[in-house]
Image: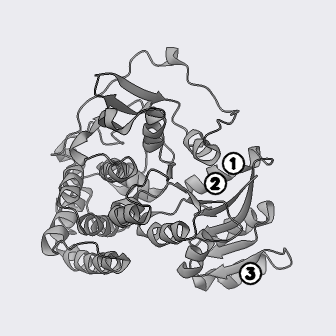
Amino acid sequence: MTNISLLGSTGSIGTQTLDIVSENPDRFSIVALTAGRNWRLLAEQALKFRPRLAVIADESLLPSLREALEGSGVETAGGSEMVAAAAALPQADMTVIALVGYSGLLPTIEAIRAGKRIALANKETLVVGGELIARMLGGSCRSILPIDSEHSAIFQCLEGESADSVEKIILTASGGPFRTFSAAQLEHVTAADALRHPNWDMGAKVTVDSASLMNKGFEMMEARWLFDVAPEDIEVAVHPQSIVHSMVQFRDGSVKAQLGVPDMHLPIAHALSYPVRLPSPRPRLTLEQYASLTFERPDMERFPLLRLAFEAIAEGGTMPCILNAANEIAVASFLRGELPFVAMPELARRTMESIGREEVESLDSLVDANSRARRRAEEILPALRSLT
C-alpha cells in the first residue's frame, strides 16, 4: 500500500490521479489532498477518499471547506504554507505534485527535505529551480518520477540504458491548435481558440502554453534536469497525432520511442506504481488507426517563446525563473482578454532583457527573481495590450 499526498487534486492531473487510486484500492490510499480555490470539489474528494488532511490554498475559503467536512474526521487547513506542509506529511510515502506554475516549487522542496518519493507533474518546479533541486538531490534529479507524458516516455526509453549511451532526446509536441496558422492569423486568435486543443484535455494554463509552444520550452528545461542532458542535446519535433510521446536517440544511431493513446492516465499510473505496470481498463493503441505518423520542425519565428526558452536555459542562473514569471503574467492576461496572443513572447523578452541574470545561491535567490520579474512584467504589460 502506497500512501499518497496529492497536491492539486481538483485539476486535470489531480482528478485523473484519483481515478487510478479508485481503480487500485489495494495499492493506493490518500492521506492528504490540496486545492487552490475549488473547495466544493475538494470537499467531495475528501468525503470519498477520507484523507487525514484537506488543504485549500486560498485561506478565505477555509470556512466553507471546514463546514462541508464537519464531522467527517478530515482535518482541514488553509494557505500556501499548509500546502507545502501537506507535501511533507509524515504519513505519506509518495507526494504527487500536480500544482500549476511557480506554486509547485516550495512544496517540492519540502517533499525532498522530508525524504518523500516524488511524482512530478509540475513543469515549472524544474524550470525555475532545477539547479537548486539537483543540488538538494545530490547532483541529479533522476530520482524524481515524471508524470508529464513526454518525460514519462523518455524515462521509459532510458530504462536499462547507461547515461553515456544517450546521444540526444527528442521531445514531441502536438503543435497545439495554431500549428498551421500564419503569423497574420495568430494576431487575431482568442483565449477560446487557444483552449481548443486538438488532442489533450488539460487545464487552461497548460493548454495556452501548448498553443504558444512555451510548454515545450518548459519541457526541454525539465528534461535537462530530470535526465542530466545538455540543452543542446535536446530537440523538439512537432508530431500532430500525439501518439509518439517522445524519443531517445543513442550513440549507435538507434532510436527508442514510447507510443500510446493521448491519455494522461497512462503516465500517471506508471509514476504511481513504478517499477510495476498496472493493468488498465482504458482503450489500447491500435496502429491501424494511424496510417501516417508525421513529424516536422517547430517554427520558432511564429512561436518565439520556444526560442526564448532555449536562450534562458543557455544563460542559466535565475533566467529560466524570470522567463517563467513573465510567461505566467502573460498567460493570465491573455486568458482575461487583455493581452494579444502574439504579445506574450514580447512581454517575456522585455522582462528577460530588463532583469539581469544572477546565480542561484538558495531558494531566496529564486523567490527574489520571481518577485522582481512579476513586478517588471506587470509594468511592461500596459504598453503591449494593443500590440498586433
Tell me: residue 4, above or below residue 68. above
Is the C-beta separation of discs 2 and 3 under 8 Å? no
- Within 10 Å of the Cα at label 2, are there few (<14), some (14-19), or many (20+) other Cα atoms? some
Q: Amino acid at mark 1?
A: Asp
Do we see residue 144 in this rendering? yes
Outermost left residue: 353
Q: Residue at x 63, y 49 (%)?
A: 16
Closer to the chain start, of discs 1 and 3, is 1
- Residue 380: quarter of image: bottom left
Closer to the chain start, of discs 2 and 3, is 2
Q: Amino acid at mark 3?
A: Arg
Q: CA distance from mark 2 to mark 3?
A: 21 Å
| SS category of the residue bearing label 2 | helix
Q: Which mark is residue 15?
A: 2
- Residue 338: quarter of image: bottom left
Q: Which mark is residue 66?
A: 3
Q: Position of residue 256 (x, y in %)?
A: 40, 26
- Within 10 Å of the Cα at label 3, are there few (<14), some (14-19), or many (20+) other Cα atoms? many
Q: Residue at x 47, y 63 (%)?
A: 100
Is the C-beta separation of discs 2 and 1 under 8 Å? yes
Q: Residue at x 21, y 61 (%)?
A: 343
| SS category of the residue bearing label 1 | helix
Do we see residue 331 in this rendering? no
Q: Position of residue 316 (x, y in %)?
A: 22, 62
Q: Which mark is residue 19?
A: 1
